[in-house]
């Protein structure tokens, strides 16, 4: 009797189930990791108390506050889940679902662990799986990169519907901002990916990873494209400095202002899931996927359970490093204005992305596809960018507004004095003495 499923279907089902749970667990602890990274940058401690007490151990398993994600999840489950008056209840509930689903299915075409040989598997006398080679991938399709771009673009619908259905002007403005930003940055994102695909000659991520293992990582050939891709990934994931859709100083909370409990948690988790998917595609396109130089088990020719585990760990480690950089950027670079976000996309990234695609197509046509040749092309484009920036017209959008009586526009006969006058402030130690008088507590 013929087998019920082939080897690839059997492996793909296991990859989908295992990786989905790995990502969900990782998302929970990415929130913890970001809180610890932000605490370190701001010279704070961060979560360090919540842990697990099993009752049978003489100590509490709570070092570093690793129980904080579980506490946060319980908090979201127990909070009141309300719907504001005047909201479209169906769309209000559907929006977070449409946000989380694309984030949890986009990684299906990522080649996590290379190839593996599967033997015949029998269960109760039935031939369940036929022997054969298989890829450690969720969906072995021929349109891998195209699939990821199509799925990633669906995330904007959740944000837009959330802002519209809330019946809140701040939420609505946040949804509009996110829509304009995502649409704008999808263009240079696609252009940078197209430049890589012109060299690779395929849209299958597994073939792109194998090519990098043999010829060198594409980060060496396309450093400019990798930088553009990373910037666009931050904007697509709604991460700082591009998180104008939820700017607290202007929009209270943006598109999710009216959300609470688990519906808000889905928006929160979707952001981190998008970060994992974007970083996975970045690693597959530019950083060699699961390949690590000088480690034979990470080469595509290495087949078996051991090499598969090593490849997955190598791939996922690169993904986590990319996410850590995203977190450092968030807590280092301040949020840029909404008009500056769009100006960066339409005035810089889109023209440069198109120029990169044209230059790459020319290099492929001329047969100049060696690493050093493509690197020189990237350097030439970067040099042209730096040379042309001073020649472009610039508008003073950050000019100071002359307010009469301010230190920038003193009144006639007055002289603005902005230096500190308190003796404690003028002293090098900054410590107030007993005779310095009242010191502000602010």
Image (spheres, rainbow, N blue to C red):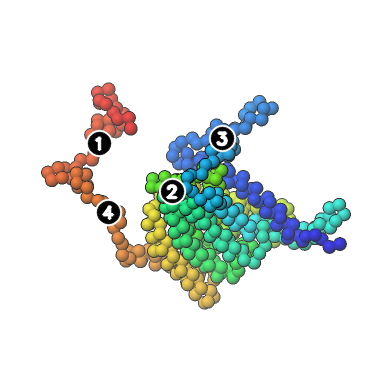
The residue pinned by badge 4 equals: 399
Badge 3 crowding class, 10 Å Cα cut-off, few under 14, some 14 to 19, many 20 or more, is some
Q: Which comes before the other along the chain, label 3 or label 2?
A: 3
Q: Quadrant of residue 338?
A: bottom left
Kindly check if marks 4 and 2 are in contact, taking CB atoms under 8 A apart as contact: no
Q: Give the secondary structure at mark 2.
A: loop
CA distance for labels 4 and 2: 32 Å
Q: Nearer the viewer, mark 3 or mark 4?
A: 4
Q: Give the secondary structure at mark 3.
A: helix
Name the residue: 24% across, 30% down.
423
Q: Which comes before the other along the chain, label 3 or label 4?
A: 3
Name the residue: 21% across, 44% down.
406
Which is nearer the eye, 115 or 251? 251
Which is nearer the eye, 7 or 88? 88
The residue pinned by badge 1 equals: 420
| In the image, residue 214 above or below residue 107 | below
Query: Is residue 224 in view?
Result: no
Q: Give the secondary structure at mark 4.
A: loop
Badge 2 crowding class, 10 Å Cα cut-off, few under 14, some 14 to 19, many 20 or more, is many
Q: Quadrant of residue 339?
A: bottom left
Q: Nearer the viewer, mark 1 or mark 2?
A: 2
CA distance for labels 1 and 3: 42 Å
The residue pinned by badge 2 equals: 168
Which is nearer the eye, 433 or 93? 93
Q: Position of residue 191 (x, y in %)?
A: 49, 66
Image quadrant occupied by the C terminus: top left
């Amino acid at each position: 009797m013929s087998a019920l499923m082939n080897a690839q279907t059997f492996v793909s089902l296991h990859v989908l189930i295992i990786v989905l749970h790995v990502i969900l667990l990782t998302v929970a602890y990415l929130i913890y990791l970001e809180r610890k990274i932000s605490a370190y940058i701001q010279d704070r401690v961060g979560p360090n108390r919540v842990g697990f007490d099993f009752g049978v151990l003489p100590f509490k398993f709570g070092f570093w506050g690793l129980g904080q994600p579980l506490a946060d999840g319980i908090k979201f489950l127990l909070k009141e889940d309300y719907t504001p008056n005047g909201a479209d209840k169906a769309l209000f509930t559907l929006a977070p679902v449409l946000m989380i689903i694309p984030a949890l299915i986009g990684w299906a075409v990522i080649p996590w662990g290379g190839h593996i040989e599967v033997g015949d598997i029998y269960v109760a006398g039935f031939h369940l799986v036929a022997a054969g080679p298989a890829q450690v991938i969720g969906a072995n399709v021929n349109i891998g990169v195209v699939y990821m771009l199509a799925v990633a673009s669906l995330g904007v619908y959740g944000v837009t519907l959330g802002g519209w259905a809330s019946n809140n002007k701040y939420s609505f403005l946040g949804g509009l901002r996110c829509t304009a930003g995502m649409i704008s940055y999808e263009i240079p994102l696609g252009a940078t990916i197209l430049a890589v695909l012109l060299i690779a000659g395929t849209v299958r991520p597994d073939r792109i990873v194998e090519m990098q293992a043999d010829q060198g990582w594409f980060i060496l050939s396309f450093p400019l494209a990798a930088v553009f891709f990373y910037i666009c990934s931050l904007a697509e994931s709604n991460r700082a400095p591009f998180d104008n859709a939820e700017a607290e100083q202007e929009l209270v909370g943006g598109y999710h202002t009216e959300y609470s409990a688990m519906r808000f948690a889905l928006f929160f988790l979707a952001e981190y899931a998008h970060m994992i998917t974007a970083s996975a595609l970045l690693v597959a396109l530019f950083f060699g996927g699961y390949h690590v130089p000088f480690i034979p088990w990470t080469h595509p020719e290495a087949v078996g359970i051991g090499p598969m585990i090593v490849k997955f760990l190598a791939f996922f480690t690169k993904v986590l490093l990319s996410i850590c950089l995203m977190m450092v950027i968030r807590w280092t670079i301040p949020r840029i204005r909404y008009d500056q976000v769009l100006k960066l996309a339409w005035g810089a990234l889109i023209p440069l992305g198109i120029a990169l695609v044209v230059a790459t197509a020319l290099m492929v046509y001329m047969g100049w596809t060696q690493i050093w040749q493509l690197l020189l092309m990237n350097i030439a484009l970067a040099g042209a960018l730096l040379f042309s920036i001073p020649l472009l017209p610039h508008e003073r959008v950050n000019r100071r507004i002359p307010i009469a009586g301010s230190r920038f526009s003193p009144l006639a006969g007055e002289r603005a004095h902005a230096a500190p006058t308190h003796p404690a402030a003028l002293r090098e130690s900054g410590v107030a003495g007993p005779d310095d008088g009242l010191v502000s507590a602010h």
